[in-house]
Image (tube, coloured by chain):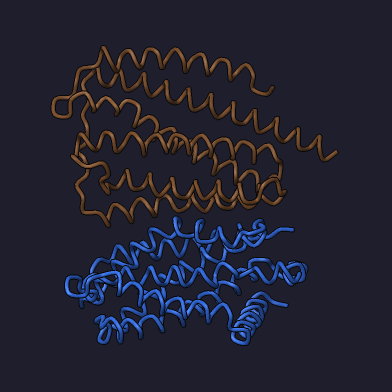
Amino acid sequence: MVFRKWRMLLWAAAAALNAAGLYMVFFFVPEEVTMGEVQKIFYYHVPSAISSYLLFALAFAFSIIYLWKDEPVWDTLAHACAEVGWVFITVVLVTGPIWGRAAWGKWWVWEPRLTTALVLWLMYTAYFLLRLFSGHDPRTARVAAVMAIVAFFDVPIVHFAIKWWGSIVHPPKVSLEPEMRLTFMVTSAAVLCMAAALTLTRAAIGFAEAEKLAGEAR
Amino acid sequence: MNYWRAVVKIFAKDFREEIRRKENLAAAFFFAFLALVLFYFSVDPTRVDLGQSGAGLLWLVILFAGNLFMGNTFKKETETGTLQALLLAPVDRSAIYIGKFLVNLAFLLILEALILVLAFILLAMPIGGHIGWLAAVWILASAGYAAVGTLLSSLVAQIRGGHLLFPLLAFPVLIPLLIAASSLTQDVMLGHGAADIRWLQLIGLFDTIFLVAPLFLFEYAIEE
């Protein structure tokens, strides 16, 4: 299997960092004054958002390389990044309302960052529908790559449109206590490692699938 | 054949064909009419003043009705093999895109003219004095819709049952355009002109990105 060493390493790091991170979130870091313990969701909510944005950026880059080089390996990588990115943006959309319910008193607030995440979720869900509909048609990869590029170009426009549209107040910029910053750094590293491990694992599965299909075609 | 002549030929071919067959346009027009009537029934006219807050509804009707013909931009061509012939023609492939884009834009504008007349007559929306601004905003926003729609319909044309996917792919991408166009339309109807210039800039940016990107992407989108 491809990336075997890297995957093992990343999964081990993700496990260790997550253990440390969870311990710190529950036992080490002080509670935020106004929001109380529910604010602790922040330590996984924000790193998930960062991971998904990074992965979507990678999916965009790999899609471009795929169209340019026309080598299936880039499509598999783009697919893996988009899929894991989608998982993390879903985490953002699930943890957001739980936090929002406590912080703003409402499950859903049409707040710019959360809403941008929602639109991203919609676009990448459509991307997977596109892949689902087209099955293993050889054109799938190219069509999906174009969609990934279109979606990525749209992100900054979506961001500004939603920012100007909503008059809802941004939650105040958080200033973090030293313990909070440390915890946040650990959980960020944990989530990023986990994202990388998942992506490589997904890519390895993708390669195996492609190999099997190629075998059947022969 | 030079580039712009190819664009004009493709535009003329598609425009004439659709005017003769009428099925896509007729469906879109009728749907727009129907949707406006349905929207009107869905709100309580004694409580909601559509003139004050209905601009977004018009844009929803445009998106939904436009999707009826825009999703099929390449459908017949892939079915009859015309696309193959077009791709073999010794002309840059982006010319096909531009031609198709112009056709879609033309049909969108015709559709919008109809929607405006209906909104004026049926919903008493305050349109009369602001036609200049409205035309400017709607033409700009429609260019964005047609640009994205033409590219995405070339994608779904290659997939069996893909026409179902068109709105699912296009609408999320069009969200910023919908927000901007609705806000501007509302401003204009309330007599503020384009009160917030940022919306015009946003639409301009959207148009630029999605008119330039397909010039490179389209070639890959329809490659055989």
Horizontally, residue B12 falls left or right of residue A217, namely: left
B202 above or below B13?
above
Residue B206 appears in the picture as rendered:
yes
Q: Is residue A28 above or below residue B118?
A: above
**Percent coordinates x, y for residue A38 in the rendering:** 23, 27
**Foreground of the two, B139 or B182:** B182
The answer to whether A105 appears left or right of B215 in the picture is left
Can you tell which chain is drawn blue?
A: B
The quarter of the picture where residue B196 lies is bottom left
Toward the viewer: B171 or A9? B171
Up/down of A4 relative to A83, above or below: above
The image quadrant that residue A27 belongs to is top left
Q: Position of residue B137 (x, y in %)?
A: 35, 74
Expressed as whole percent of the image width and height from the top left, the position of residue B19 reads 59, 86
Which quadrant of the figure contains the C terminus of chain B? Answer: bottom right
In the image: residue B115, left or right of residue B26: left
Q: Colour of chain A?
A: brown
The answer to whether residue B89 is visible is no
